Structure formats: structure tokens, C-alpha cells
Image: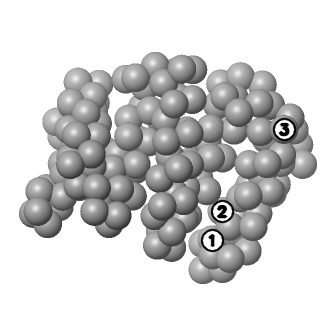
């Protein structure tokens, strides 16, 4: 996965996960932004640890209704994952799925559908049709199609 994040960044990221678990989304967002900024500065934007920090912040933003900013971060992470890990890597496909889920509430259902079909095909190929991640993508695709 590339160079490990510097020791101070790991507790910051882990604390953000714990704080989010307790429902303090504002504090979690601040901590995730700090972890992302630090990781990007020290490891570089395309380091897998930085990409993971990017998707974690995007996940929080999506979960708190900040879909437009989440989409920007997912697009950034997706481009990095595709460059570093390839189009069919699990992290890439998860980001494709999550980007689609963030796009749908913004009225971008056509792009969301296209992305979910991509994620579904990749997950069926690599994980099989009965895997939980594959089924999750099927459910997300069904939701987009139903809301049309």
C-alpha cells in the first residue's frame, strides 16, 4: 500500500472513526480533514493511505448530506485508485459504488446508474454474485432505477 502514514496521523484518523461512532460528526469531520491534509502533505495525494483518508472523509460527508463535496472527494480518490491500484481493485470498485450513491441525491441518476453498473460488473467478476459487496451494489442500483 505504499509508505505508512506518519505515527501522529494514525491516531488522528482512528480518533475520528471513534468520534464518528459516538455521533459527533462535526468533530469527526475536523479530525478527518486534519488526517487527510497531513497525509497528503507527507505522503502525497496518490498514496493509498491518502486515498483512504480521502474516501473516509467523503463517506462522512455523504452520510451527513454534504453530497456535492463528497462527490468531489470521491472523484479525486477514484482517479488516484485507478492510477495506483487499477480499475478492478476492490478499493476502486468501492469508491465507484460510493460515488454513485453520492451522485443520486444530486439528481445525477444517469451517471449514478452507469457507475453502479460498472461496480456491479467488477464485483460480480472478482467477488461473485452472492458476496455482500456485490449484493449491496445491486441494491444501490435497484434504488437508483426505482427513483427514476
Which image quadrant for residue 147? bottom left
Residue 39 position (above or below residue 3): below
Q: Nearer the viewer, mark 2 or mark 3?
A: 3
Which image quadrant for residue 60? bottom right
**In the drawing, what numbered circle is on residue 122?**
none
Helix, strand or loop under label 2: helix
Query: Is 127 situated left or right of 41 in this image?
Result: left
Residue 143, given in percent of the width and then of the height, sits at: 17, 61
Observer-nearest of 10 and 119? 119
Q: Is residue 137 visible?
A: no
Query: Is 35 situated left or right of 42 in this image?
Result: left
Q: Nearer the viewer, mark 3 or mark 1?
A: 3
Residue that appears at 48% across and 24% down = 82
Observer-nearest of 47 and 79? 79
Which image quadrant for residue 20? bottom right
Which image quarter is the N terminus in? Answer: top right
- Residue highlighted by disc 2: 17
Tell me how far mark 2 sits from mark 3, CA to CA.
21 Å
Are there few (<14), some (14-19), or many (20+) residues within 10 Å of tag 2? many
Amino acid at each position: 500500500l505504499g509508505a505508512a502514514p506518519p505515527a501522529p496521523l494514525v491516531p488522528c484518523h482512528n480518533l475520528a472513526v471513534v468520534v464518528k461512532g459516538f455521533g459527533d460528526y462535526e468533530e469527526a469531520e475536523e479530525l478527518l480533514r486534519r488526517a487527510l491534509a497531513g497525509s497528503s502533505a507527507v505522503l502525497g495525494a496518490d498514496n493509498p493511505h491518502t486515498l483512504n483518508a480521502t474516501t473516509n472523509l467523503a463517506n462522512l460527508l455523504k452520510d451527513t448530506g454534504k453530497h456535492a463535496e463528497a462527490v468531489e472527494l470521491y472523484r479525486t480518490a477514484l482517479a488516484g485508485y485507478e492510477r495506483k491500484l487499477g480499475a478492478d481493485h476492490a478499493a476502486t470498485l468501492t469508491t465507484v459504488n460510493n460515488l454513485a450513491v453520492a451522485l443520486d441525491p444530486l439528481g445525477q441518476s444517469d451517471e449514478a446508474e452507469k457507475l453502479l453498473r460498472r461496480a456491479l460488473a467488477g464485483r460480480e467478476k472478482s467477488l461473485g454474485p452472492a458476496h455482500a459487496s456485490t449484493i449491496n451494489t445491486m441494491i444501490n442500483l435497484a434504488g437508483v432505477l426505482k427513483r427514476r
